[in-house]
Amino acid sequence: MKVFISGNIAQVGIAQLKEKNIEITQWDKDRQITAEELIEACKGQDALVSVGPNKIDAKFLNAAKHLKVIALHSVGFDQVDVDEAKKLNIPVGNTPGVLSGATASAAFLLMLAVSRKAFYLHKKIINGNWQNYEPTPELGIELNGKTLGVFGLGKIGLEMAKKCAGAFQMPVIYHNRSRNEDAEKEIDAKYVSFEELLEQSDVISVHTALTDETKDKFSIDVFKKMKPTSIFINTARGGIHNEKDLIQALEEKIIWGAGLDVTNPEPMDKNNPLLNMDNAAVLPHIGSATEETRDAMAKLIAENILAGLNGDKLPYPIW
Ligand SMILES: NC(=O)c1ccc[n+]([C@@H]2O[C@H](COP(=O)([O-])OP(=O)(O)OC[C@H]3O[C@@H](n4cnc5c(N)ncnc54)[C@H](O)[C@@H]3O)[C@@H](O)[C@H]2O)c1
Ligand SMILES: O=C(O)[C@H](O)CO
């Protein structure tokens, strides 16, 4: 059996596949594979490990309908045309759960960094602008006791809520399409409407998938309903906030600050104004990028691939 891997995954997953005598071809160039190159690379392969934002759309799926399984190196699957995969009977799997802690840590890191203007102040030192100790330099804001509003209380949202409640005694409110009663058994979290989430939160952290419903959900009208002292955090997908509107909201102090691990497009242009604002912090989509998490993701990928090649039900399917 042959598997094409369109980027880098942890060795532990590759070893799991090699143990089963699977022949592996890996994309080894220092750039993302293009759509055409991906189609070409999948010719003669039995399975694909899709790393990064490759579009697994109708065009790709129809050109690669010989694949017995596709394993994503992500939990998010907004890049996949699930209906088409179902129609062509190509099982697709993802990596749920194992990256929730790491991704929530990235959200927590951004929240903390924005609240103390850490990225901006770090740049001041690098640029030689740390003159002397000042009692009132650019002041931050306290997080202790402030209200966390989670938009999308799923696996990652729950981990973020636990961290904020534990570290800063932050009361948690959340909005989902419907109540998450399982999560409410684990933490004290109050379900509120989207409007209430905007009005009552001191920090809003986004943890939904990118869908037609959530695309551009955070636009200028929404930012205007948030508190002027509030912080917006997005570690889910860049398409969930409208970037132009976010820049306006930060420039006009409609909200206090924003922290992003995801942008639209990715990579972000190095001249993007968000990179030089005192009230913004941006990371290059590293939510799940810890040694432990990448190993765990690679193991799930190998399990999905082995099951699919065997004609078994995937252990971590998206359909
Ligand atoms: N930055 C990163 O590196 C990184 C890492 C992992 C995941 N992610 C993103 O985080 C997302 C969430 O991952 P997860 O494992 O927590 O998923 P999950 O399915 O466990 O949680 C998503 C939650 O969002 C809710 N939701 C979905 N649509 C909604 C809507 N329209 N309105 C309100 N709530 C809605 C769902 O009910 C669910 O509770 C992924 O889809 C992915 O895009 C990013
Ligand atoms: O969805 C995910 O798992 C992350 O964004 C990594 O792509």
Image: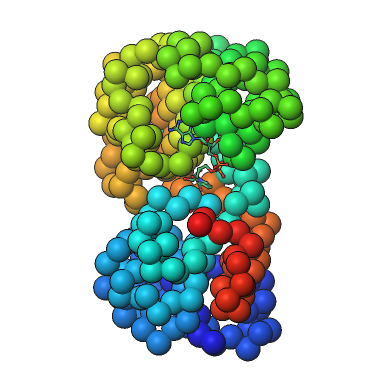
Most foreground residue, 90 or 116: 90
How many numbered marks appear? Answer: 0
Quadrant placement of the N terminus = bottom right
Q: Residue at x 65, y 13 (%)?
A: 145
Q: Residue at x 33, y 39 (%)?
A: 212
Q: Residue at x 38, y 41 (%)?
A: 211
**Image quadrant of residue 170?**
top right
The answer, for residue 123, to whether it is visible in the render is: no
**Image quadrant of residue 215?**
top left
Most foreground residue, 316 or 133: 316
Q: How far from the left and from the top, in percent, is residue 142? A: 59, 15
Q: Residue at x 28, y 39 (%)?
A: 272
**Image quadrant of residue 280?**
top left
Q: How far from the left and from the top, in percent, is residue 85? A: 40, 63
Q: Which colour assignment does the render follow?
A: rainbow
Residue 147, relative to residue 59: is it above or below? Answer: above
Q: How far from the left and from the top, in percent, is residue 139? A: 50, 15
Horizontal side, residue 54 vs residue 149: left or right = left
The answer, for residue 182, to whether it is visible in the render is: yes
Horizontal side, residue 196 vs residue 213: left or right = right
Residue 185, relative to residue 141: is it above or below? Answer: below
Residue 263, relative to residue 182: is it above or below? Answer: below
Q: How far from the left and from the top, in percent, is residue 73? A: 52, 61
